[in-house]
Image (tube, coloured by chain):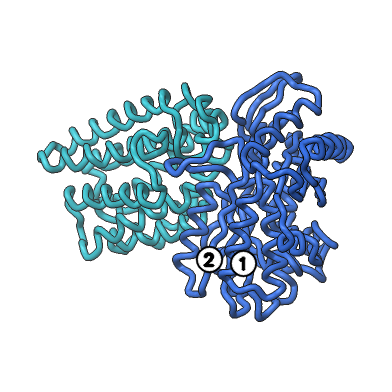
Chain colours: A blue, B cyan
Amino acid sequence: MKKFVNDIDDVMRESLSGLVSAHPELIRVEFEPTFVARRHKTPGKVALISGGGSGHEPLHAGFVGRGMLDAACPGQVFTSPTPDQMLAAASAVDGGKGILFIVKNYAGDFMNFQMASEMLDIENATVLVNDDVAVENSTHTTGRRGVAGTVIVEKIVGAAAELGASLDECKQVGDRVNGATASMGLAFTSCTVPAAGRTTFDIGDDEMEVGVGIHGEPGRRREKIKPADAIVDELLAAILDDLRPERGRELILHVNGFGGTPLMELYLLHHSALSRLRSAGLSPVRSLVGNYTTSLEMAGASLTVTLLDDELRGLWDAPVHTSALRW
Amino acid sequence: MNTTLIIRSAFAVQQAILSHEADIELLDRAIGDGDHFINVRRGCEVVAGLAPDLSGLMPSEALQKIGVKLLGTIGGASGPLIASFFLAMGRTLEGIVEPERHDFAAAFAAGVEAIKLRGKADVGEKTMLDVLIPAARLLTRLVDEDAALADICAQMPDEARQNMLATKDMIATKGRAYFLGERALGHIDPGCKTCEVAIAAVCGVVSQPDLKQEAV
């Protein structure tokens, strides 16, 4: 394993300290229990709290700031945070209008946030993100995962909260964005959890994992690597089959890198996906390209589409000022 | 089952888990995301570190203290599940100074039921419940039948082992392996392996009644 590490047990603390020392005007960090919050509390609005395992940076702590999250609770690498973190974050950022938790649909994240929600004596609600169409949905199973679409949910709900939406309204907007969002990804390599010291799975030089999540875990199937356009066709087919947008529908196209793929390739994917969406009669009016929901140093990418209407487009365009997203 | 035995069991489970590191990691790398062993080890460490604060507590208090500590330490899916197990066990034993076998069996069953409720899972979904639910049933039956302690401590690990192995032929509908679909076939569930190791370790402690009075 080649990583910048001093002591494995200090990786998270040192990394979070660095995030905050790089953006001291925006955020602060607390330890024991660990959470990252806006430098200055914003009273009189619904407070948005997200969280999840570390290793997905900049998700979620990189999205704490005006127009997006109020706090983020990072867990150990790929391991959900614990309820005490969420309770501490909630009491630190509560602005008197309730707490909205934004949770990716993984059993661990779901259960820890659920316990926090039950234990919290502030009015609260939860938006569960499950945008990954690589996994079939069913009420009898864990259901679809939450992946790169989470950034879009956090941005849009963050704007709604900043504009004074109530807890119910924020929850409704969040559920609506989630329902209008679909993602699918694929990986060329696995990644190494620092504490494990070796890659989570082995993969040949000419192979790719299709339908992979954001934890370096194996995907739905393994195939020989294909040209980028063929990969984009496959990912978009699954996404559009899920969303079934009508002709001319406006949308956000998000090309997300998993951490080990250069921007040069991500833009190549964007070029390919954008022209395909246009050929399909759709109207991709907003784009986001970069490493936003990563899986440590995994090489690979996901495509996310969010269908827009006037309200959602306005909320997407609203100002945001966080360490990882700013306009 | 008094608090001394609970503490002895905790250390035994920690030792057993550490000695199975390679097996558990291999299984989790196959169908998990590689963090199961690390989380379980962290859980064992904090419970071991808690030992000095536990001795002198009633069994119910000790179990609840373990539960609260684990809830704030493990994270992941195993955190709330394992914590719910200990909290429910503790609640069931409330007010009982020296729980008898049937008290302990009832507490174990309540702990397993709490995992089932929190995880919304059941037998056959390729999760730790595939080992735990049959284990709770067997323990209840053996205690009802007044089986000898040696018998209970011999049958429980056997049952756990068989049920752990049986998860090899299952497709997961809950937990991380669910995302793999049929690719999870042919792999034992890592959570079941951990539970099997833990059950065997606890039985190893409980089957030595002569050590029961030894101070920790």
**Residue at figure coordinates x 31%, y 49% from the top left:** B113
| Label 2, residues with CA under 10 Å away: few <14, some 14-19, many ≥20 | some
Q: Is residue A290 above or below residue B159?
A: below
Element assignment for label 1: helix
Residue type at the position of mark 2:
Ala
Residue of label 2: A125
Q: In which quarter of the image is the N terminus of chain A?
A: top right
Q: From the viewer's perspective, is A323 left or right of A149?
A: right
Q: Quadrant of the C terminus of chain A?
A: bottom right
Callout 1: residue from which chain? A
x and y percent of residue A51 in the render?
A: 62, 57
**Residue B45: which disc?**
none
Q: Which chain carries label 2?
A: A
Q: Residue furthest left?
A: B145
Q: Are marks 1 and 2 on the same chain?
A: yes
Q: Are marks 1 and 2 in contact (CB under 8 Å)?
A: yes
Observer-nearest residue: A229 or A217?
A229
Residue neighbourhood size for the residue with mark 1, other residues' Cα within 10 Å, grouped as few (<14), some (14–19), many (≥20):
many
Q: How far apart are marks 1 and 2 (CA)?
A: 9 Å
- Position above or below: A277 against A222: below
Comparing B211 with A285, the one in front is A285
Left or right: B122, with B148 as reference point: right
Estimate the x, y position of residue A133 in percent, counting from the top left.
Answer: 61, 39
**x, y (%) of residue A173?**
63, 62
Residue with the mark numbered 1: A170
Residue at image position (58%, 71%) is A167
Residue at horizontal 66 percent and vertical 66 percent from the top: A71
For mark 2, give the secondary structure.
strand
